[in-house]
Each structure stands twice: as C-alpha cells, then as structure tokens.
C-alpha cells in the first residue's frame, strides 16, 4: 500500500524511535544510542540517504546475522601514534566513540595520529566523525571501503565500494569546514531512495547488468555503479580500498561483499581516520595561519559559491527549530520493522 505525505517528528522523538527500533532488534543499549545518534544527525542535517532510512538497512543487517548486536569493542595501541579499535563485528559507531579520546590525545602529543576501526559493520556517513574531531581543533581525514558495487573507469564490472572520503578543518569560533562524499558518482543510498520513490536516475550514475548505461535505479543496483570524475574518482576509490583495507589489515570491498554471502547486509570491514594537530607544524604561529585559511573560505563564498557542509548546517538549524518531516511511507516501513 502506498502512503502519501509526511510525518512530523521532533528530534527527541526521532531519537526515541531509532533507539526503540534498534533495541527491539537486539542491539545493546550503548550500540543503539550511538547508532541512533548518527542516524538522527543525518536526518537532521538533510542527509536522507544516511538518515532514518538507515533503520531499515540496519534492521536487515541484524536480522540476517551480519552484525553482532552486543559486540564489546576492544581498544589497543599498536604503536605510539596509532589507535586500533576492534569492533568485534558490531556497528562502527560505538568503536569510534570509544577510540576517539585516545586518538585526540595522541594527535595532540605527536602532532599526527591515526585510528583504525577493524571488523566493524558500516552503514553510515563519515561527516559526523570528522566534524566531531575537527571541533576538537584537529584536521581530519577519514576513509572506508564498502561492498564491491562500483566499476573502475573504463570497465563495467564492480570492484570498488562506494568508498567515501571525508575531511574536516577546524575554524576558530565557527563550525568546521567539512566535506564527505562517495567516490562513486553518488552514494548507493541515494540510488536506493530513487528506487523506493520510483524515480529514474541520471544515465551517468551506472550500468545495468549488461554493461549499458541505465536510468533505472534497480537495474544499476543490480549492475554496476560508476565512479565520479572518470579516472580521478576511480583512482581515489582504489586508494580508499588500500588505506582502509590492506593497510589496516582489513577487507577490501570485494572481500566484504563475499563475506556477506548474499545476505544483503551493510559492509563489513575497516575504517581509517587520520588526525593532525595544526599546532604540531605551526606552534605559536597557529592563529595567523588559520586566519589565512579563512581568507580562502571568504574568496570562495565571496563569489557566490558555497562551502561543502553549508547546506547541512542550514538544514540542521531548520531541524532544530522546526523538527523533522520524514516520508509517511518510510515511517510506516520503520514501524513495520519494529513490529516484525
Ligand atoms: P554528495 O555527492 O551529495 O556530496 C556530498 C558532499 O559534497 C557534502 O560535503 C556536500 O556538502 C558537498 N556538496 C554538495 N554539493 C555542493 C556544492 N554545490 N558546493 C559545495 N559543496 C557541495 O554525496 P554522496 O552521495 O557522494 O555521499 C553522501 C554520503 O554517503 C556521505 O556522507 C558519505 O559518507 C556516505 N557514504 C557512506 C558510505 C559508507 O560506506 N559508509 C559509502 C558511500 C557514501 P553539503 O552536505 O553541505 O551539501
Ligand atoms: O550509500 O553507498 C552508500 C553506503 C554504503 C555503505 C553505507 N552507505
């Protein structure tokens, strides 16, 4: 049955709904709280492909036994400036939260530090993580592979995941500069939302199973997605595979998809987060150099171009003032998942 219209939720109601669904599905309360926070942040900031829709995706991962719902993450220090968190097969959010304080401490002590999340199930956007670290005054890079859904430029057979890259830069007295995008033409979640809504997609997002460009969302989901920016996005996708796969002793997107064994769960594998303390290079000159960065941001905005992240912050302010509106069909599907 199709359901028209929207359902209004306050942010607190959305958080309660998300935690209720996740706990009903067996997630331990600390995992449910961390995962709900990420999903509600996505919905709040207008990132609907990684907002409350992800409850349906997470429920599938739990139902199919892809994720360990009560995993207890283990934090270790493989080297002075390195943090490793073994997620033990659980969702990535709690391992990130548990490793973050040590990553910040090491970045401040050594000027640069890196954290590997291993053996985690990843359904989420990366910007909440880089934003949280940049708010602590650090420059941040984050990478994660996914499932092999994306063909390399020049081919039509999936090798790469949708492999996002996120970056955060601290801005004194204001929200950090943050970008976060898939190295595919678009996130897979966006194509899934088009499929749910019965909407066609641009022809350059992917190929059908016969390798032909297709405007049919389902055909591309069953075929191969394309990288963004031709050979450049393809090379960046390969880099993400390498630095957040073999470099940290974790799976590539092809290995993750194989490990899924057709269950349709979220990707299982690793994430690499690199944090740099600007004070390491700049010392007492920090403020002067950070203000030169502000001049660059002003030159971008001064000509009417926008900064990445600015749309999100506008959406955030609106959601905080007015609450959320989600499609009634999505709300119905979430309630059905809860009652299953
Ligand atoms: P987009 O192509 O929409 O790109 C998003 C980024 O580009 C945002 O930082 C956005 O800022 C910025 N941006 C968009 N338009 C402009 C513009 N005109 N001028 C300046 N900046 C702009 O997103 P994707 O579909 O590639 O990815 C969406 C999400 O999917 C990401 O958060 C990513 O982490 C997630 N993802 C997660 C995966 C995983 O394995 N965990 C895999 C793939 C994707 P703003 O937000 O302000 O619009
Ligand atoms: O939208 O491509 C995506 C995605 C993969 C894993 C989480 N999101």
Image (tube, grey):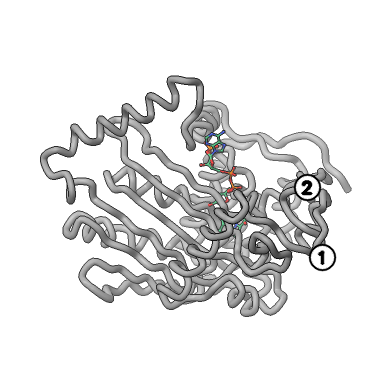
- Tell me which residue sits at (28%, 46%) in the image: 136
Q: Where is residue 159 in the image (x, y as percent from the top left)?
A: 64, 69
Q: Single out the residue that lies furthest toward the right.
A: 1
Q: Is residue 41 above or below residue 24?
A: above
Element type where label 1 sits in the image? loop
Neighbourhood count class around disc 2 (C-alpha, 10 Å): few under 14, some 14–19, many 20 upward = some
Please give the residue where the numbered disc 2 appears in the rendered image.
203
Q: Is residue 46 left or right of residue 215?
A: left
- Tell me which residue sits at (80%, 63%) in the image: 211
Of 107 and 47, nearer the camera is 107
Q: Where is residue 333 in the image (x, y as percent from the top left)?
A: 75, 52
Q: Position of residue 202 (x, y in %)?
A: 76, 44
Establish whether ligand 1 lies closer than 8 Å to the Cβ of label 2. Answer: no
Q: In this view, does 12 lie to the left or right of 192?
A: left
Please give the residue where the numbered disc 1 appears in the rendered image.
209
Quadrant of the displayed image that contains ligand 2: bottom right
- Tell me which residue sits at (36%, 74%) in the image: 74
């Amino acid at each position: 049955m199709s359901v028209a219209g929207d359902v209004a939720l306050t942010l607190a109601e959305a958080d309660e709904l998300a935690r209720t669904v996740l706990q009903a599905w067996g997630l331990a309360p600390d995992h449910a709280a961390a995962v709900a926070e990420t999903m509600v942040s996505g919905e709040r900031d207008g990132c609907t492909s990684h907002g409350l829709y992800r409850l349906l995706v997470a429920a599938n991962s739990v139902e199919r036994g892809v994720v360990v719902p009560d995993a207890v993450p283990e934090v270790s220090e493989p080297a002075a400036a390195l943090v490793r968190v073994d997620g033990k097969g659980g969702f990535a959010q709690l391992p990130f939260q548990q490793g973050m304080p040590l990553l910040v401490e090491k970045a401040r002590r050594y000027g640069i530090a890196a954290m590997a999340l291993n053996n985690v199930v990843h359904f989420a956007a990366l910007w909440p993580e880089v934003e949280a670290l940049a708010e602590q005054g650090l420059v941040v890079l984050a990478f994660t592979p996914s499932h092999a859904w994306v063909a390399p430029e020049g081919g039509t057979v999936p090798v790469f995941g949708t492999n996002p890259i996120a970056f955060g830069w601290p801005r004194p007295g204001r929200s950090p500069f943050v970008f976060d995008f898939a190295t595919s033409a678009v996130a897979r979640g966006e194509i899934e939302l088009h499929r749910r809504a019965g909407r066609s997609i641009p022809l350059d997002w992917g190929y059908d199973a016969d390798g032909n460009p297709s405007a049919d969302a389902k055909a591309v989901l069953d075929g191969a997605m394309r990288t963004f920016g031709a050979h450049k996005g393809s090379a960046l996708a390969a880099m993400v595979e390498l630095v957040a796969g073999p470099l940290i002793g974790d799976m590539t997107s092809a290995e993750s998809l194989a490990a899924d064994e057709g269950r349709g769960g979220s990707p299982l594998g690793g994430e690499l987060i690199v944090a740099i303390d600007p004070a390491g290079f700049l010392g007492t000159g920090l403020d002067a150099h950070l203000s030169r960065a502000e001049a660059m941001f002003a030159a971008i905005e001064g000509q009417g171009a926008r900064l990445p992240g600015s749309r999100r912050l506008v959406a955030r302010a609106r959601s905080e003032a007015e609450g959320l509106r989600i499609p009634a069909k999505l709300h119905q599907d979430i309630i059905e998942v809860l009652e299953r």
